[in-house]
Each structure stands twice: as structure tokens, then as C-alpha cells.
Image (spheres, rainbow, N blue to C red):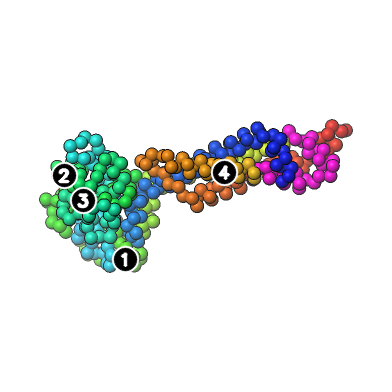
Amino acid sequence: MFLAIKEMKYAKLRYFLIIGIMLLVSYVVFMLSGLANGLATGHKQAITDWDASTIVLSSDSNKIANASMMTRSDLTRIQAKRKAAVGLLSTSSRLSGHSGKTNVSIFGAQENSFVVPSLIEGHKYSNDHEVIISANLKNDGYSLGDKIKLGNDPHAFKIVGISKSTTYSIQPVIYLNLNAYASLKGTSGELTTAQQPISLVAVKGQSPEATKITTHKSDAKLSKLSVNEFITNLPGYSAEKLTLNTMIYFLFVIVAAVLGIFLYVMTMQKISLFGVLKAQGIKNSYLIQSVVGQSLIVSVIGVVLAFILSVLTSLVLPAAMPFTVNTSEWLLYGAVLIIVSMIGALFSIHSIIKVDPINAIGGE
């Protein structure tokens, strides 16, 4: 390690350049990881907040909530102690008297069900024209007591409660009761309460295997999913995560290749030096430790600086940007970056072993 540090002090510019490349690649890895986790969280956070174990959908929905068509009467078919009927709708919202619209995810649920979140302000809705909003809508100017319009519904809804910030399909969330949900779907006046539409039933504390569904001849078929399986099938969730993670994995390969090439070229430039050292009795193992040690030092410095820079960047990103710092994942990726950079350094070992002291110092 002494030789490695001594040489790095002598050729500062070269090694600063390598550290810079390592820093930039590591920074991109951490930022992509943050975006991947942010997008994943943005898709599923509201579902995760329910702390449910099982999701029941109509069988013909292909495991997608937006395609599921159930009725409130289906709730009685599901044998579970803690269950909640939920209606799901994506629409736009605007403050009454304003033209600016915000895309939101609507959840219809009875006010006493476990899916309705705890509030940080106000109270739960008590009639068909009251709603709870997630706190991230405050960034769009929404506040307690405001009246809003949802989609094409002619009625105004009053904001009576605010829950913590959350999202579904990367959109802020609004909760209202099932009668109001049926009104937004355009079916409230045509159907009985039992016939009103819902999208799914969430079950808490029971696995899909333990959740039984009664089915009569005229009943629509229902499917049971674990929450993890339901989340995996959310539109865009798996595809976005796979795309960004694949980019990260390619960057690991790029790090090994780039650092390996740099160190190989620098090793070839030091052939005569290695020849002199070998002539003085220095063993191959010592020279190899020097090259690998340089790779370790360079990669650790680059990764640590990138980690710090990424954390600082996350503090100044816009609130609307889906970005989540997963410290344990970043530490894992940092370790992988260091390991692959050292693997890249192994490309130089063969050249070091092949050095002939006599030829390297210009002998016959």
C-alpha cells in the first residue's frame, strides 16, 4: 500500500481524473436508484399505507384495479374480520373558482374503514360532499376548508381533513365516501346501495389463502391477491423499476471496464519501473497489491464523494419529483461499485507478471 500511495502522490492529476470518473458514475448510480425508488414509492405508497394483507378484485380485471368492476354487495361475500370496500378513480381536481387542474387519484371508502388514513389536520368526512386530501396537494394551493371540483361532477366538495403526503400512480390522493364515489362514476342515481360500483376489497390481517369467498351461480368471479402481487401489477410499476435498475447494472459493467482500461494503460506506462523493482527483488505479489490498492483507494474516495453529493442533491430536488433515498440500497450499490472497480484492476495483473526485468530496463 506504501507504493500505491507514493505513486498517487506523484501522479496526482491522473488519479484525480480517475476519481472524478468514479465519482460521476457513482453519482449517476445513486441518482438512478433514488429515481427508481421514488417512482416505485409514488406508484404504491397509498396502498402500502393501508397495511392490508390481501386484495380482492374481479377475476376478469387481469389483476389491475382500474379494470376491476365489483359492487358493494360483493363485500358480504368475503369472509374476513377486517375488510374494506374501495373505489378507485383517476381524474382531475381544481379549486372552486380556479381553472388550474391537478391530476389526482380518488379513493372511495367508508369513513370508518381502515383504509382511510389518520389525519394531521381536520376531521374525517361525514357526508357525500366532504373529502380528505393528502398533504402534498397543499403544494398546489389546497388547504383545509377549501371547496374543490372533481372531474366533470357539478358538485363542490369541501376539504375537511388532511392526511400525510401520499401518492398512487404518482398522483396525490383524495378520499371520499362510496356514495360520492358512485356519483363521480355517474351511477349514484340509477343503482341501489348494494349495486353501487367499487374497484376492490382490501383485507387486513388475513392471507389470500385464509380469505374465503362465497360464490353463487349468478355471482361474478373474484380473485384474491397478496398486496405484493397487486403492487407488482400496478400499471408502469414493474416496467419503470426494471428499466432504471437495468441502467444501474450496466453502469456497474462500465465502471469495471473504464477503471480497468485506465489502470491497464498506466501499468503499461510503468513497465520499466516494474522491471527495475523486480530487479531489486520486489515480488509480483507486492506490485499486484499496489495496483489493486490504488483501485481500492480511488473507488472508495469516488463512491464516498458521490454518496455525499447525492444526499445533498436530494435535499434540493423539487417536492414534486419522485425521489427516495434508500440508504441501505445505496450502501449496497456503493460496495458493488468498489468491488467491480477492483475486479477491473485485475486486468493489469497479467501484464505485471509478464514483466521481464532485463527487457524492461533495456537489457539484451
Q: At 68% across and 45% down in the image, what residue appears?
A: 293
Question: How many residues crowd around disc 3 within 10 Å: few (fewer than 14), some, or many (20 or more)?
Answer: many
Point out residue 161 in the picture as x, y percentages from the top left corner.
Answer: 24, 51
Q: Which mark is residue 211?
A: 1
- Residue 112 is inside the magenta segment: no
Q: Which mark is residue 160?
A: 3
Q: At 88% across and 33% down in the image, what residue appears?
A: 364
Q: Secondary structure at mark 1?
A: loop
The stretch in magenta equals 269-295
Point out residue 110 in the picture as x, y percentages from the top left corner.
Answer: 21, 57
Comes first in the chain, label 2 or label 1: 2
- Whether tag 1 and tag 3 are in contact, CB under 8 A, the answer is no
Which residue position holds label 4?
A: 303
Disc 2 vs disc 3: which is toward the camera? Answer: 3
Question: How many residues crowd around disc 4 within 10 Å: few (fewer than 14), some, or many (20 or more)?
Answer: many
Name the main secondary structure of what is drawn in magenta: helix
Q: Which mark is residue 156?
A: 2
Residue 350 vs residue 182: left or right? right
The foreground one among 323 and 121 is 121
Comes first in the chain, label 4 or label 2: 2
Comes first in the chain, label 1 or label 3: 3
Q: CA distance from mark 2 to mark 1?
A: 38 Å
Question: How many residues crowd around disc 1 within 10 Å: few (fewer than 14), some, or many (20 or more)?
Answer: some
Comes first in the chain, label 4 or label 1: 1
